[in-house]
Amino acid sequence: MGVMYTLLAGIFISLQGIFNTRAGEKIGMWETTTLVHGLGFAVSLLIWLFARDGSFSRINEVNKLYLVGGALGVMIIFCVMKSFALLGPTLAVSMLLVTQLVMAMAIDVFGLFGSPRISLHFTKPLGVIVMILGILLFKLKG
């Protein structure tokens, strides 16, 4: 199931990026970001009303830093739209994936934000280098 959710997220992120970019070209980037988050809130609220699989009563147990995810989401939407508009979807997503992988690796290696520490084997940074080389190869005019 984890693979399926990951593949779906990849599809949704790519579609969201291009849809938001095209909307932003017409109505503005911040207007689109506001609209996207408003619609996202409405959909999330509807799903929550039916699912009810958690409890807001335990919110005081949550590290307050983790509650800024929505604010990060605003910056993610904006930065993805700008990068799609300036670099094109393929290059933007490629660079985004490498950046996400490097950040995730740092979180794993240093055990940040409550994650268990995972030792850094040489194959992990080597994989990132291969991805970067792939992006450079992709950028070659052919």
Image (spheres, rainbow, N blue to C red):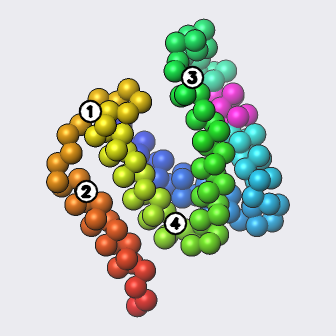
Q: Earlier in the sequence, mark 4 or mark 1?
A: 4
Above or below: residue 18 compared with residue 75: below
Q: Earlier in the sequence, mark 2 or mark 1?
A: 1
Q: CA distance from mark 4 to mark 3?
A: 31 Å
- Residue 79 placement: quadrant: bottom right
Q: Identify the residue position indicated by label 4 in the image.
A: 92
> Where in the figure is residue 22, as x and y percent of width and height?
71, 65
Q: Is residue 84 left or right of residue 134?
A: right
Q: How many marks?
A: 4
Q: Is residue 20 left or right of residue 127?
A: right
Q: Earlier in the sequence, mark 4 or mark 3?
A: 3
- Residue 72 placement: quadrant: top right
Sort mark 3 into few (<14), some (14-19) or many (20+) by Cα contacts within 10 Å. few
In the rendered structure, are the residues bearing label 4 and label 1 in contact, judged by CB atoms less than 8 Å apart?
no
Q: Quadrant of the C terminus?
A: bottom left
Residue range corresponding to the magenta coloring = 41-47
Q: Earlier in the sequence, mark 3 or mark 2?
A: 3
Label 2 is placed on what type of residue? Answer: Pro
Label 4 is placed on what type of residue? Answer: Ala
Q: Determine the secondary structure under disc 2.
A: helix
Label 3 is placed on what type of residue? Answer: Lys
Seen from the viewer's position, the closer of residues 101 and 120 is 120
Q: Identify the residue position indicated by label 1 in the image.
A: 117
Q: Identify the residue position indicated by label 2 in the image.
A: 125
> Where in the figure is residue 47, as x and y percent of width and height?
63, 28
Q: Is residue 19 visible?
A: no
Q: Determine the secondary structure under disc 1.
A: loop
